Amino acid sequence: MDAALYAKMLYDDNFRELRKMQYKYSNESVSEMISLLKETAYKTLPLKDFFGQGIVYLESIARVHMSIYKSLLSFGSSSGSYGLKAMEEEIYASLTIENIDSSRDSIRRILSGYAPKDEMENRIFGMKQGLDFISDTTNRINEENIHKLYQLTVGNYLSENDRLLSNQMYRHDSVFIVGGKVEHQGLDHKKLSVYMKKLVKFIQADSAMDDILKAAAIHFYIAYLHPYFDGNGRMARFIHLWFLVQNGYPSALFIPFSSYINKSLSAYYKAYTQVEDNFKISELIDITPFFIYFIENVYNHISASDYNIDMIEVYRVALSEGKITEKEKDLFNFVLSAYGNKEFSTKQLEKDFKNAAYATIRSFVLKFEKMGILVSHKYGNRVKYTIVANVR
């Protein structure tokens, strides 16, 4: 194949849609391009498609901006916490994606520790239990814990027909994902145990693959296999977050991933469709379109989050140099969790935190303001604080 044509095709805006590429260049040119990619460029994952062939991606095209790592490494607590404001939005968006009714008022109630009062709040309570489970770093990702997460989050709130059999970890029959037409059929249920074991092995194994892309690959693969009758999307998104937390990115639970997905939902589903449609031409499950979706619509937005990157670095350096006490670290994590980028007063923080004297609270906000991590806002005789935000 001519090198100039090969390069032109690789950088074509339609590259992720092979049907359009065939129309633009010819079937023969696309076949030659795929053959060259197989020989020189594709990275093969230890995850199999439904026919036993390895799933692939193009590392040279799927590249994550370095600022995302700063965002994901910046905050969070090793004790296992999550941002209440962020996870309120995460739960709302994740349920909305699956057309499940919820309200932010009910989500706030459940996250604040109140008991569910109806079926809607039961589902929200399941999501809270899921967050509690994956934020506990002692809960390692294995088949048993994936099953436990599913039951806590989804399984216990399903109708009898959609529930798993008591002695099985995965569905016991076929499942179809239906839009205007049948768009995808999940893996043959008899093979699910074998494929899920391979997925867990991939999750647990050290690899040279970028962690951020690996999380997206796990997300894709769960939806691709569709191991449950219902709740596959919620599980894919939860395990995506869980993998990041387990691999040293605690701030994943301070960022509402599903909110970004919900805002780009048509592109999210289109990425799955592109992978399936391209398979009909290349006979490969190439998940590069899914990676590109996540980079463009989720990861790049996280790296431009509400938190100032320079401030994050100040916090990390001060923490590593021992300039921040354990109590101050706990207070800052609480501020992130409870208030996010919203204003708070010292009195409000004292009341909500419940485990520090007012003098300690006052010292904390003044110190962190001097460091450039918090900023004060005066309203007459009252003063409120917020975390320093990016300039938009």
Image (cartoon, rainbow, N blue to C red):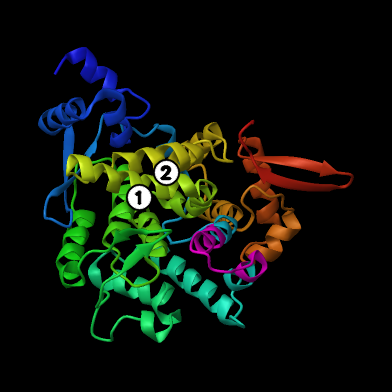
Q: Is any atom of residue 138 visible in this view?
A: no
- Dot 1: within a 10 Å radius of its alpha carbon, few (fewer than 14), some, or many (20 or more) residues? some
Image x and y of residue 120, in percent: 57, 76
Q: Which contiguous range is marked in magenta? A: 90-107
Amino acid type of the residue that numbered disc 1 sits on in the rendered structure:
Gly
Residue with the mark numbered 1: 248
- Label for residue 73? 2
Amino acid type of the residue that numbered disc 2 sits on in the rendered structure:
Leu
Seen from this angle, which residue lies furthest right? 380
* Secondary-structure class at tag 2: helix
Estimate the spatial distance between the alpha carbons at disc 1 and disc 2, rounded to whole Å: 7 Å
In reply to whether residue 92 is colored magenta, the answer given is yes
Residue at screen point 70% across, 65% down: 351
Secondary structure character of the magenta stretch overall:
helix
Residue 378, compared with residue 344, is above or below; it is: above
Residue at screen point 21% across, 40% down: 281
